[in-house]
Image (cartoon, grey):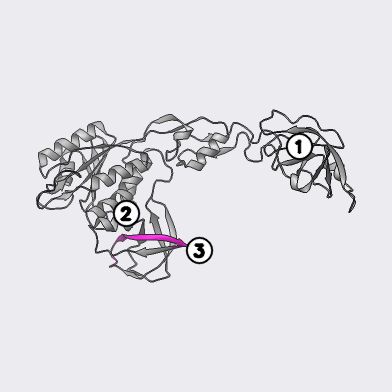
Amino acid sequence: MFVYEDALAAIFNHLPLMDAESIEICDCSGRVLAEDVVSEIDAPALDVSAMDGYAVNSLDTCGIAAGVPLKLRVAGCVRAGDCHGGVLSSGTAARIFTGAPLPAGSDAVIPEENAEALDGHILIDDNVAVKQYVRSRGNDLRKGTKLFSSGHILRAADAALIAGAGIARVNVGKSPLAGIITTGNELAAPGDPLGSGMIYDANRCFFAARCAELKVRHSLRDIVRDDYEELKVSVLNAADSCDLVTTSGGTSVGEFDFMASLLEKEGELIFWNARTKPRRPVVFGTLRGKPFFGLPGNSVSAMIGFEMFVKPALMKMMGASQAAPERIRAFMENSYFENADRTRFTRGHLRYSSGKALVHALDPRETGMASNLAKTNCLIVMPADIDSYSEGDVVEVIMLR
């Protein structure tokens, strides 16, 4: 039985890499870069003012005596967007606005609140340093500077930086199409009448919503009953048309749990279960050359299985250099005990207080409650050799986002 790290390595070794596609920068958030992004310009392209005020030559201000202000004639006005700032003669100043290019002959800016305007002139009381309130050319970006590396998962702030470098499109890994299948005679689609002994299918909605958050396309298949032939047709059809298939239900050893045996007969079974908790079995292999995940039907176990196995696979397929779940550190808010025989991913709720990350372990007995899922925003990692945490202990946490 694989430990978690070995199971994830086995998954990564059986994944195809998606082709690249070019997209508009405004659509890039959440996508994975397929190439390095390099600035094509200096930004700013010229020395510009960092304040509203007056552009001056700092040499004109040398030697200002206490109580004897310097008088400079205002010889022009430069606004943001002007192609150049003109030329400034000694003994003069130019009205200038934030982002406007400095006139030739000037090398500093006096904020307007530090100058007294009087009949086309300004009066200033203090010496001015070279480059005071000036953003120098290339201060933000230098032409040829690498902004982001291939494999980086883009955020909205990254899009702003790339757009500021004048780049309109980027190459990213194509979004894979994930086939989603849920199984079980007890399942009913939300909105349908609920018969006796049946429950609404929450897993397919979670899988679909999570795919949307990850910028992954998905194909929802009909609920499959506990019938081997019906299951076989559904998963083979999904494998033929999708880049990855994930299912829930039928992964255990019961009379109507067909997932592992079907994968052995129709594809390649890489592993069946990993040494992790929740203990519900996870099936992984390939079907028609496509990655195939069989997750438990239990809602909490299915959610954790998706986060710890399927999400990393999807991100890796899109080319993410950091596809494994990222871990942060937090302080325990309560004590927690769980038998130590394998790595456990315990549901938790993390919050920040005075800049400090605090995590509360949730009741492990509520493994099938949808309300418990709604409270969960992280997983607390408990290594196989640790059976308890006390309040105040520093722990590793995987955020669910």
Please report whichever mark, 2 or 1, sits nearer to the chain's N-terminal start.
2
* CA distance for labels 2 and 3: 34 Å
Q: Position of residue 341 (x, y in %)?
A: 28, 64
* CA distance for labels 3 and 1: 44 Å
Please report whichever mark, 2 or 3, sits nearer to the chain's N-terminal start.
2
What span is colored magenta in the figure?
338-357
Instruction: Return the residue at label 3.
Output: 354
Q: Quadrant of residue 73?
A: top right
Q: Quadrant of residue 107?
A: top right
Write the residue at 28% across / 51% down: 303
The answer to whether residue 289 is magenta is no
Q: Position of residue 18 (x, y in %)?
A: 36, 34
Residue kind at label 2, given as amino acid type: Tyr
Looking at the rendered structure, the secondary structure element under dot 3 is loop
- Where is 384 relative to 30, above or below? below
Q: Position of residue 139 (x, y in %)?
A: 66, 40
362 on left or right of 132: left
Q: Position of residue 269 (x, y in %)?
A: 22, 44
Write the residue at 10% across / 38% down: 229
Residue kind at label 3, given as amino acid type: Ser
Mark number, residue 95: 1
The answer to whether residue 344 is magenta is yes
Residue kind at label 1, given as amino acid type: Arg
Please report whichever mark, 3 or 1, sits nearer to the chain's N-terminal start.
1
Number of numbered discs overlaid on the protein picture:
3
Q: From where the camera sits, is residue 392 visible?
A: yes
Looking at the rendered structure, the secondary structure element under dot 2 is helix
180 on left or right of 20: left
User: Where, quadrant-wise, is the N terminus in this rendering?
Assistant: bottom left
Q: Nearest to the eye among marks 2 and 3: give it.
A: 3
Instruction: Return the residue at label 2.
Output: 4
